[in-house]
Image: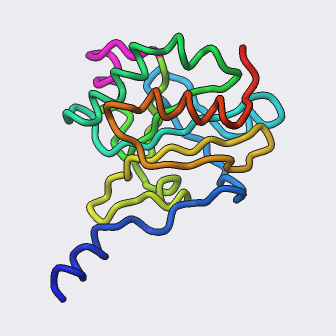
Amino acid sequence: MRRLLFLLLALPALALGVGERAPAFELAASDGHTYSLAQYHGKKWVVLNFFPKPFTSGCTAQCNLLRDESARLSAYQAVILAANTDTLAVNKDFAVKQGYKFPLLSDADKSVTTAYGVLMPGGFAARRTFVIDPQGVVRDTFDVSPSKAVDQVVESLARLGVPKA
């Protein structure tokens, strides 16, 4: 019984599902800009990647793939964003040290992570990706494997028929 209770407490709240409207967000990023879902409305697909913690092995592997295979991702008319619950200063440091050109969004107050249903009990984001269409509707969502993050995103964009850039 204790093991079952522990497992239930370790799960995040129920994440958004396909067909649901993506919650609006406006978050400061590691590149000095602020990003919002509204700025892409009617224009581009948004791939919102949540990850738990900068400077950890799994998160570094996941983000390094996004960096190293950016050409595969930029082949689609989609913007790639990564978000976590760390401070802007930590995300800036992580982005600079790893050479990331994509923005790392800081959700330090955990409001966006909570709205997307991926806040874990320890205050970290679950490793989950949301593919959001230009009208703001979630069209795909999946748990991410750090070593297959780009493959998973590209497969999703292709399956959904996201236009090529």
In the image, is residue 100 part of the stretch drawn in magenta?
A: yes
Check the image and report above or below for 15 versus 81: below
Q: Residue at x 19, y 33 (%)?
A: 57
The number of numbered discs placed on residues in the rendered structure image is 0
Name the residue rendered at 25%, 36% in the picture: 58
Q: Is residue 117 above or below residue 96?
A: below
In which quadrant is the C terminus drawn?
A: top right
**Residue 20's x, y, as percent?**
70, 59
Picture quadrant of residue 118? bottom left
Percent coordinates x, y for residue 29 in the rendering: 48, 30
- Give left or right: position of 27 versus 8: right
Q: In this view of the protein, which residue sits in the foreground, 1 or 43?
A: 1
Is-magenta flag for residue 131? no
Tell me which secondary structure the magenta stretch mostly adopts: helix
110 is higher (above) or lower (below) than 149: below
User: What is the span of residues highlighted in magenta in the rendered image?
Assistant: 92-101
Residue drawn where x is 48% and y is 39% of the image: 49
